Image: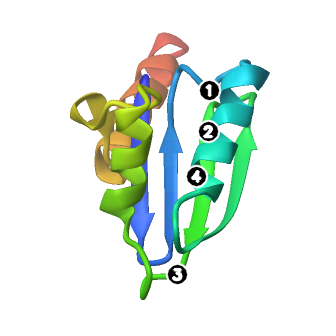
Amino acid sequence: MSYYVHHVPGRLRVKSPLIKNNETVAAAVKQLLRGVNGVDSVDVNLTTGSCLVNYCTKTTNNGTIINALQDEGYFDLSRAMTNDQYFEYMTSKALTLVSAFI
């Protein structure tokens, strides 16, 4: 899994391979998203390549934030898994591992 997106109003999590273990990109992503009107906070996890964005739903939306990331080349929504797809992927992976020991 390279890209991932999960959204509930006011909270957006994206994962990108470009962020993973790259402090320079993580800092640039934080700076970019902090500049989006309505973004309250941005937390980046270098180990997972995850970026958690909390925002005001009256001021902005998840599409605006994702577009900002895409415009700068940090995210590719067309290659992103949704939460349901991610769950299915991880379940399949776990079943494969378990069946190897049976």
Pointer 2 with pointer 4, Cβ within 8 A: yes
In the rendered structure, which disc, 3 or 2, sits on the residue that comes first in sequence? 2
Label 2: few (<14), some (14–19) or many (≥20) C-alpha neighbours in 10 Å:
many
Please tell me which residue is depicted at 42% across the width and 88% down the height of the picture: 58
| Furthest-top residue in this view | 100
**Label 2 near label 1: C-beta < 8 Å?**
yes
Q: On residue 19, which mark appears?
A: 1
Which mark is nearer the camera, 1 or 4? 4
**What is the x, y in percent for residue 6?**
42, 55
For discs 1 and 3, the disc positioned in front in the rendered view: 3
Q: Quadrant of residue 18?
A: top right
Residue wearing tag 3: 56
Q: Quick one: SS at disc 2?
A: helix
SS at mark 4? Answer: helix
Q: Identity of the amino acid at label 2?
A: Val
Residue 68, x across and y down, in percent: 41, 46
Instruction: Say what amino acid the circle numbered 3 marks.
Output: Cys
| Crowd around label 3: few <14 · some 14–19 · many ≥20 (10 Å) | some
Q: Quadrant of residue 49?
A: top right
In the image, residue 58 sits, relative to residue 23, either above or below, namely below
Q: Amino acid type of disc 1?
A: Ile
Q: Nearer the viewer, residue 41 or 5?
A: 41
- Mark 4 neighbour density, 10 Å: few (under 14) some (14–19) many (20 or more): many
Q: Residue at x 55, y 14 (%)?
A: 101
Residue pointed to by mark 4: 33
